[in-house]
Structures are given as structure tokens and as C-alpha cells.
Image (spheres, rainbow, N blue to C red):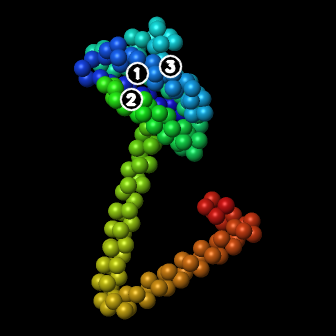
Amino acid sequence: LVVLAVLTDEKGLSPADETTYRTLVGKLRQDSANVVSLQDFLSSPEVREVLSSKDKKAWYLPIALAGHAGSAEGGVAFQNASKLIKQTMAGSTLVAHLAGPAATAADLSAISERDMHVIEIGTGIMVLLILLIVYRNPLTLVMPLITIGISLVTAQGVLAGLAELGLGVSSQTM
């Protein structure tokens, strides 16, 4: 799992920024539980030009994290590494931006979780409106909802019982 930390200073990189960069690299190297390796220009000065922007306002820090894309271990490693990066950058003139597959997956997950409640509420309202239009009577509208609720609870209980018996009906029951 790879993430690219882009460290920027719009006023131009300074010796103070390099001190912050050194601190960040040191902390990332100490975090062996989450960080597998990183490519920095401190340990390999010959790559400094490649890992620096042409306008001297950004440094790139490729970081290999533990785990694979989509795995729980990879997600935890990304969260811990990004938290460490943000904490280290706090109070400095450097701003950290994260890019790469791990950052994209984390952003998509955060957006999905944030929007899920809106989608659920919208779906509920639409179903109630459709049922109200079809049945035209609130009492008649409640009957299908009660039937669906009883069926759902019964089905969940049956599936849970089958899973307890070792009959994997789906990946969720296993």
C-alpha cells in the first residue's frame, strides 16, 4: 500500500521546512508497525531533485504502508500514518497533502459514510410517499410496513440460526 505525502510551502521551502521534514521522516521510520519503508532525500541525496518540485515549493515523500489496498490492516496503517503526518506538520509552514490509492480509498470511504445518512433518510421518505400515494390512507399504509418489518426480523433470525449451525448462506452470515 503506497501513499505519497506532498509537503508544500507556498512561500518557498526554507531550512526550517527541512527541519520539519527531518522530524517527519524520523517519526515515520520509528513507526515500524504502520510504515514499511519510505523514499526520502535525506538518506538518498541523489534523489533530492526528483523528490522536489521545480518551483522549490514542494517535496514528495513516497511511503509504503503495511497491508494491502482494501484490507483492514492497510486502512489502519493509512489512518495512523496520516494522523502522524498531520501532527508533525502542525505549527509549521509546511502543509501536507496525501495522494495515491490509499488516500483515494480513505477519501471515498469518508464521503460514503458522510452521505449514507442522507441517502437513507431520502430513501425512507420516498418509500413513505410512494406508499401514501398508492394506499391513500395512513392506516392502510402501515400494514405493508408492519408485514415487511416482521418478514425482515424473521429472515434475519433464520439466517443467523443457519449460520450458527455452520450453513454459510452468504459471506455476511459467515
Q: Which mark is residue 20?
A: 1
- Residue 61 lies, in percent from the top left, at 44, 23
Badge 3: few (under 14), some or many (20 or more) residues near its Cα, within 10 Å? some
Q: Is residue 50 above or below residue 149?
A: above
Q: Which mark is residue 89?
A: 2
Q: Residue furthest left?
A: 11
Which numbered disc flags the more N-terminal residue, 3 or 1? 1
**Could you tell me how far apart the alpha carbons at marks 1 and 2 are, in whole angstroms?**
7 Å
Q: Which mark is residue 39?
A: 3
- Residue 90 lies, in percent from the top left, at 37, 31
**Could you tell me how far apart the alpha carbons at marks 3 and 2 are, in whole angstroms?**
18 Å
- Residue 1 lies, in percent from the top left, at 54, 33
Residue situated in front as seen by the camera: 106 or 15: 15
Q: Is residue 143 above or below residue 98?
A: below
Residue found at x 54% / y 77%: 152
Where residue 97 sits, quadrant-wise, is: top left
Which numbered disc flags the more N-terminal residue, 1 or 2? 1
Q: Are marks 1 and 2 in contact (CB under 8 Å)?
A: yes
Residue found at x 57% / y 34%: 34
Nearer the viewer's eye, disc 3 or disc 2?
2
Residue situated in front as seen by the camera: 17 or 139: 17
- The kind of secondary structure element at disc 1 is helix
Q: Is residue 164 at all visible to an observer of this figure?
A: yes
Residue situated in front as seen by the camera: 32 or 102: 32
Q: Are marks 3 and 1 in contact (CB under 8 Å)?
A: no
Nearer the viewer's eye, disc 3 or disc 1?
1
Amino acid carrying label 3: it is Gln
Residue found at x 44% / y 83%: 145
Badge 1: few (under 14), some or many (20 or more) residues near its Cα, within 10 Å? some
Amino acid carrying label 2: it is Met
Residue situated in front as seen by the camera: 148 or 95: 95
